[in-house]
Amino acid sequence: MSRSSSTGDDERPLGTRHYLERFARAAQHRAGPGWLETLRGEAIASFAEIGFPTRRLEEWRYTSTAPIERVAFELPESDRSAPTPEELAEIAPCASQAWRAVFVDGRLCAERSVLPADSGGLRIDSLADALAGGEGEALVAAHLARQAPFKNDAFTALNTAFMEDGALVEIPPGWQEERPLYLLFVSTGNETISHPRTLVIARPGSRATLIQDHVSLDSGTRFSNAVCEVLAEENAALDLVLIQRENAQSYHVSNLQAVQERDSRVALHTITLGGALVRNELGLMLAAPGAEADLRGLFLGGSRRHIDNHTLVDHAVPHCTSRQLYKGILGGHARGVFRGRVIVRPDAQKSDALQSNPNLLLANQAEINTKPQLEIRADDVKCSHGSTIGQLDREALFYLRSRGVEERAARMLLTRGFAAEIAAGLPLESLSGWARQLVDSAVETLTADMEGSET
Amino acid sequence: MANSNPDIEKLTGEEYKYGFVTDIEAEQLPPGLDETVVRTISAKKEEPEWLLDFRLKALARFLEMLEAKQEPTWAMVDYSPIDYQNVIYYSAPKPKPELESLDEVDPELLRTYEKLGISLQEQKRLTGVKVAVDAVFDSVSVATTFKEELEKQGIIFCSFSDAVQNHPALVKRYLGSVVPYSDNFFATLNSAVFSDGSFAYIPRGVHCPMELSTYFRINSAGTGQFERTLLVADEGASVSYLEGCTAPMRDENQLHAAVVELVALDDASIKYSTVQNWYPGDKNGVGGIYNFVTKRGACRGRRSKISWTQVETGSAITWKYPSCILQGDESVGEFYSVAMTNNAQQADTGTKMIHIGKNTRSTIISKGISAGRGQQSYRGLVRIGPKAREARNYSQCDSLLIGDECGAHTFPYLEVKNATATVEHEATTSKIGDEQLFFCRQRGLSEEDAVSMIVNGFCKEVLRELPMEFAVEAQNLLAVSLEGSVG
Amino acid sequence: MLEIKQLHANAGDTPIIRGIDLSIKAGEIHAIMGPNGSGKSTLSNVLAGKPGYEVTSGEILFKGRDLSEMEPEVRAREGIFLAFQYPVEIPGVNNSYFLKASLNAIREHRGEPTLDAMDFLALAKEKMSHVEMPSDLMNRSINEGFSGGEKKRNEVLQMLLLEPALCILDETDSGLDIDALRVVAGGVNLLRSPERSMLIITHYQRLLDYIVPDYVHVLADGRIVRSGGKELALELDQKGYGWIEEQARTEGHE
């Protein structure tokens, strides 16, 4: 239901018009090479043509973007306050042992970052720096907007048109160092927007863990519109961890697209704990035989939060494997959406795809819409999916209470138990322990919120 | 797995055995759709004013939808646009039979139904089970058997047209109450031009003593069939109903847009079974019926139950989602489906279970078989409303693939707005295993028999829901429809 | 009964059988032993005509007729029975229904009258008692949820019902405890007759304690490297396969 391009500017809804104006106004301030300006131009033209998605689109059936459209978000002022080292240590204890890049409202904050200088070829660059010219620019030019096309995606189009900075990560061939790569995205201000962009290129035979963590240190309405493009080359192994724990007024739309080459293994761990409206789009293209994708997700929310997870695993060639486990926990008046698509193309024989989506509804007004979807056009395949929606096991609850645990604590224990699997799947003990803490405290907050609202 | 075996290819050509045409003079309206056509259909049937109004409102809405190009496109089926002004909306064997008894039915028609294996003589079938049959030929009902015997218990079973004349109050009360005239594109078209169909009313506390069945036959070329079925089970009543469908082999596509409405009041139960074997078109996808059907049952009463069982082997395109609206507390909805697509057939089918009342339960068992270049989608909605406390649903959707050119797709929609609900959905896709085939052949079974045995095993949970004698018919149908799929 | 001449065969594209000669006369029991990967199961699959197994040269005559052009079901109807090493599960297909269909297909082929449900059940019941098979297994889906022992009993039951001319037992003893082995062997021994031949493929000697063979052949690397009487099996049991393989390698290089 795309809006026709004949629509005059004046008829455009406020949201769309706002971004077109901002794009035009910023034209003279924008830095960067000519090819990038061309790309931005194409992106904003796409956005002008399609506008924000409506719920008539199957992909947006259960999620309205109206709350985002209603606010005239602005790029923040240039003096952004970085988190202090103390704050940083508190936000992410794991960051101390990691290579880290700290972004404030989408721009790299060099003082807080610890980047490899020339550490055996591992590259973590500011995208803005890379675009200033040189070898980095060539790398960006070769990979930007390849994995995440913007033609039919309004938010990716906006990101491409407006992005200022982000990370360019290149993991060299054969890289095996355990030290994780940690990208922290801090948002500040009120009614501010950021468009972080991340490019990840994992060279043949490399192995790495990359965390992208979105947080807010204070209150204020923000919109993070993140895009991440990943290329996993032959036999590369990547663990990508996406953590979203922004404040309760935040809007968060993210799009991660990965292309996997022969025998590569990509594991995505998506943990969504914050935000008023969150939409995670995850796409994995299994482009060569032997590729394996493992998608694990947890989304958790109470009050009136809305969390939408979309996954698409495309088995384009034979002999690939995909696994999906997405768990939802919803309390209060929260709404959860899960749409998991698995496509098996003709000739993609011996595809092995499994998808599971268990959900826990903790409160009467909470709601879940789930749509696990298999589209199979090859015959010699092993595909299955399952989805369940239920409550905490009454027997288990009773069992705990009969052993003297009070009901609230018992509920919390069982909810944590349900959630634990996803955090436990993170690589490195320090990371999974940390994720477990984040999830546990989110469960505690959720349980407390619900107590408060019920009494 | 191409059809390289000449014997098998021969079989494929012969597989549809109901493809004959009955040479009978028909009274037809010219092709096209406008107010005159609708008024003519209504006048021919001597319908009361309120029914004409119903039709005209539907027509106006349909023409709007047509203008706005609102023909549904979301289903995973692909066909060239239908010219709705080039369809014959009314065709009836001439003269319209005014029957005093079954003996007066045109012998040519009787022969047609005999050939289809449907006896319009009021005798018991071989199995000793009585089945009352309403035979619908193109647009009109030509005969209904066992009417008198049923009437003794107060059961009304007749053609829809007769019901309008003889039981107008019942028809007026329930028509459009489950599927409103504006419900969807094809239901709206049906509401404007429906010609005949079956009507049944089971009074309070009566358990219908025999199977009721309707046998639909499309005969004339260029016609669409738009029947309307309405079944009402009053408090504590129960009925089992079966419909069967065939059509001649023609190289044009014919449109079948039916509407079925079921109403179950307190403690009533309706079991509705379909063996759909419309002409599927030839191997290359030429011809065949477009089966665009709206079927919905309302479990209005407490503890009421509606159960749909369908075996879909025919039609070039199937678009059909028999649904249950579970309004009454503790009501039960069931959907058991086997759908088979071979050659160029396409099917997008499934169900909707709308849980409104407390403690409502639903079960969905869907078995899809794709062979040849067949494309098949399961599309199902389970919605648990905010007031449906303790609602439960279990869905299982399995697909079996035969050959590497077919496709199987699963699109479940689960929408849950009540935290006390329990919803479970499972789906699997697999192919007939080479090991299984070889095992059966090593024990002396032919490959075709082995496939048919494995397929019937795959469908067992659904087939066992069918009334006994139709289960056998359905199994044979599956075997016939699969011929030529392995070789 | 069975005449194998200079047989070479592939599994997929891989040559496995590299020249086997074997002659089995009516009433004889032959055992084929050999280490894993020697081609034992390939041989049984080739005899039964499993798709994907191809005779590249040589010939197999069964009752004087060339098998190569025969479909697997025709071989079965002619009297070749393969008791599978891993009998498959077929969900939803009733075991009893399947056995009756199978038996009737074979009876029809032999020109015998087919059995109705009553006669079949009576016959099946009698045969089941020989393999101590619980009667509820007849009403379950083929092999679905059967234990390993129950699957093997089901195979022998089918053999008893179908009364084939040539029984091929492909590692029927694997995974069986001693009691189940005794029962299975007992069933097989019931079929011993001057008109019937058996080819017993096994890795271990212990089955041959119960079904005593007339001849024992050792298969290694796709060839029969030793043939002898039943005492050969005992020798193998004591010495293992190493010396045979060693011998096969040297001979292969000569």
Image: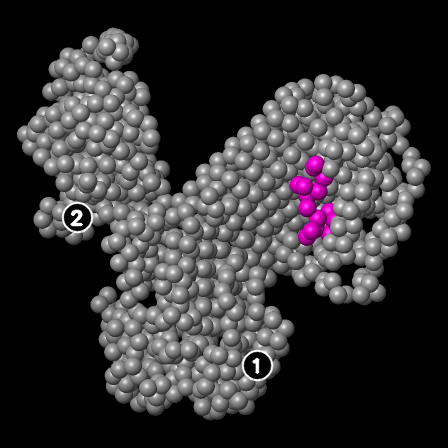
Q: In the shown orientation, is residue A155 left or right of residue B274?
A: right
Q: Which residue lies furthest to the right in this view?
A: A79
The CA span between labels 1 and 2 is 59 Å
Bin the neighbour count of mark 2 within 10 Å (Cα to Cα): few under 14, some 14-19, many 20 and up: many
The residue indicated by pointer 2 is C104
The residue indicated by pointer 1 is B59
**Residue at image x 60%, y 44%?**
A312
Q: What stretch is highlighted in magenta?
A: A142-158
- Whether residue B393 appears in magenta in the rendering, the answer is no
The image quarter containing residue A60 is: bottom right
* Count of marks placed on residues: 2
- Circle nearer the viewer, 1 or 2: 1
The answer to whether residue A29 is visible is yes
Q: In the shown orientation, is residue A438 left or right of residue C146?
A: right
Q: Position of residue A152 (x, y in %)?
A: 68, 52
Q: Which residue lies furthest to the left in this view?
A: C194
Give the amino acid at mark 1: Leu
Q: Mark 1 lies on which chain?
A: B
Q: Which chain carries label 2?
A: C
**Residue at image x 68%, y 20%?**
A178
